[in-house]
Amino acid sequence: MIRTSALLVALLCTLPTFASGFSALNDRDSFLQMIEGRKLRQFLVWIRFDTLGQIKGRAWGRPVLGNWYWQDKKLCKRVFWGTTDKGETCVKVRIGADRVLFIPDKGEGQIEEYILD
């Protein structure tokens, strides 16, 4: 229990450092300007967002397809991983020098971090 509490405190203390250096992207044009033609990459995952509102990529050997749009300063996306519908989510977008963060709307879900290639 003490180890778990110590780990939690250590993680919470690093959150402001983790988020520093990131700027908010609040509209479609700003988002496209930063990511157009680039892959967003994680371990065994890559995706691309195109100007037509489509998402394409691969995750863990399966195709990733979907669509995206902007609403209320958030990126909304519906993604299919293989034949599994992951549903529609809206996220706040933060961008750093070589990374993008997708922060779930209303605190639901996990923050997704991608490397920009």
Image (cartoon, rainbow, N blue to C red):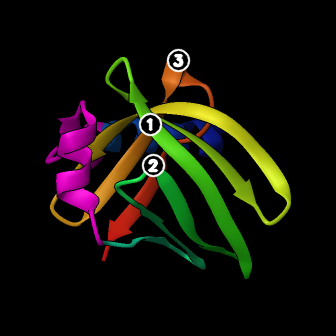
The label nearer to you, 2 versus 3, is 2
Q: Can you see residue 17? A: no
Could you give the CA–CA distance between mark 2 and mark 1, rounded to whole angstroms? 6 Å
Could you give the CA–CA distance between mark 2 and mark 3, rounded to whole angstroms? 23 Å
In the rendered view, would you say 38 is above or below 16?
below
Q: Earlier in the sequence, mark 2 or mark 1?
A: 2
In magenta stretch: residue 32: yes
Q: Crowding at label 3, few (<14), some or many (≥20) Cα neighbours within 10 Å?
A: few
Where is residue 27? Give x, y as percent: 25, 32
- What amino acid is found at the position of numbered circle 1 in the picture? Tyr
Residue position marked by numbered label 3 in the rendering: 106
Left or right for 45, reference 53: right
Q: Secondary structure at mark 3?
A: helix
Where is residue 15? Give x, y as percent: 34, 40
Circle 2/circle 3 CB separation < 8 Å: no
Where is residue 56? Give x, y as percent: 55, 66
Circle 2/circle 1 CB separation < 8 Å: yes
- Of residue 101 and residue 85, the one placed in the foreground of this image is 85
Q: Crowding at label 1, few (<14), some or many (≥20) Cα neighbours within 10 Å?
A: some
In the rendered view, would you say 107 is above or below 55?
above
- Of residue 83 and residue 113, the one placed in the foreground of this image is 83
**What is the span of residues highlighted in magenta in the rendered image?**
16-37
- Of residue 20 and residue 60, the one placed in the foreground of this image is 60
Residue position marked by numbered label 2 in the rendering: 53
Left or right for 7, reference 17: right
Q: Can you see residue 92? A: yes
Residue position marked by numbered label 1 in the rendering: 69
Q: Earlier in the sequence, mark 2 or mark 3?
A: 2
